[in-house]
Image (cartoon, rainbow, N blue to C red):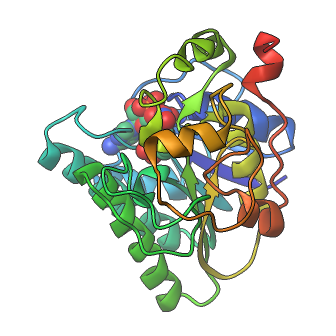
Amino acid sequence: MARVAVTGSSGKLGRAVVPHLVEHGWDVVALDRVAGLRDDVVSSTVDLTDFGQAVEALSGIDDRHDGVDALVHLAAVPAPGLLPNAATFANNMTTSYNVHSAALRAGVRKIVWASSETVLGLPFDEPPPYVPVDEEYAPRPTTTYSLVKTLEEELARQLCRWHPDLSMTGLRFSNVMYPEDYAAFPSFDADPSLRRWNLWGYMDARDGAQAVRRALEHDVPGADVFIVANADTVMSRPNEELLAAEFAGVPLARPIGSHETLLSIDKARRVLGYEPTHSWRDETGS
Ligand SMILES: NC(=O)c1ccc[n+]([C@@H]2O[C@H](COP(=O)([O-])OP(=O)(O)OC[C@H]3O[C@@H](n4cnc5c(N)ncnc54)[C@H](O)[C@@H]3O)[C@@H](O)[C@H]2O)c1
């Protein structure tokens, strides 16, 4: 059984990723500065801004583990504005450098990490170049949080240049949701501008966990990034109406379905075999 360290394991996404990986045969080491709730996986409480702690966390801690085969790095301050910008930068950038460097020292050659939909230009005050948006245009960060996600994508490219056998897969997750969040979705329809900031996208945490697992299984050297969202929008109103109201003049890159995600998951489907299995429409009967 392969062993994987999951940073940010106590967080919103981590709480879905850890059990999913366990169900699929991974031996999980859960790492977070907040103690986890699960007692069926090895866990340690670590501050990953401390390089010494990161090195031990990835290479072995007393009776917990003696090394890992892979790393899933989710730990971060997860949005703009939660902390002052410099504090977000210091936590997220330092944490990513530390865990990636510590993993490399420990011999890890498969890393999956959480990037973000924000690098696509959210909240799209400047309209996207086309829809559905994809991985083909350069990042357009508008916040310090998103700037760090952009720098982390470059960090991955350079680390893979230094280590030709290294595989780093970045997942540009959309807004993470749990089934209990879906009750609010029908109310979004009243105002198209309410959720224009991420092109009416979302990501079910369970499908996010599936994407992480598929990315772990994607053992191809080099750095690559994938948008990960659900297959549909959060809206009952059709895309034609939403785009006319909020993004008139933005060209269509290809024909799209009325409720198809405008955050393209074509690449994740094609390369990773990712296929969302949940929709808020099924959960709410909409
Ligand atoms: N939630 C979303 O909608 C969303 C969307 C796109 C990307 N992401 C990214 O996905 C990842 C997970 O997000 P989430 O929603 O689960 O966030 P979260 O805040 O719920 O979980 C993040 C976890 O990381 C831990 N952490 C942060 N800094 C740490 C450090 N220095 N040392 C140790 N632990 C640390 C926190 O304690 C927390 O438990 C993040 O990288 C986030 O930027 C989230």
Answer with the quarter of the image where residue 252 lies.
bottom right
Answer with the quarter of the image where residue 149 lies.
bottom left
Q: Relative to residue 184, is residue 191 drawn left or right?
A: left
Quarter of the image with the C terminus is: top right
Residue 257 in view in this figure: yes
- Of residues 115 and 33, the one drawn nearer to the viewer in this rendering: 115
Q: Relative to residue 11, is residue 25 drawn left or right?
A: right
Relative vertical location of residue 68 with respect to residue 184 in this rendering, above or below: below
Q: Residue at x 53, y 28 (%)?
A: 12
Q: Residue 94 at what x, y percent from top left?
A: 28, 57
- Of residues 177 and 113, the one drawn nearer to the viewer in this rendering: 177
Q: Residue 18 at what x, y percent from top left?
A: 68, 35
- Of residues 5 and 156, the one drawn nearer to the viewer in this rendering: 156
- Of residues 266 and 271, the one drawn nearer to the viewer in this rendering: 266
Residue 45 in view in this figure: no
Q: Residue at x 74, y 41 (%)?
A: 258
Answer with the quarter of the image where residue 232 lies.
top right
**Total of numbered circles in the picture?**
0
Q: Relative to residue 182, is residue 268 drawn left or right?
A: right
Q: Residue at x 78, y 56 (%)?
A: 214
Name the quarter showing ligand 1: top left
Q: Residue 195 at what x, y percent from top left?
A: 47, 31
Q: Residue at x 41, y 40 (%)?
A: 197
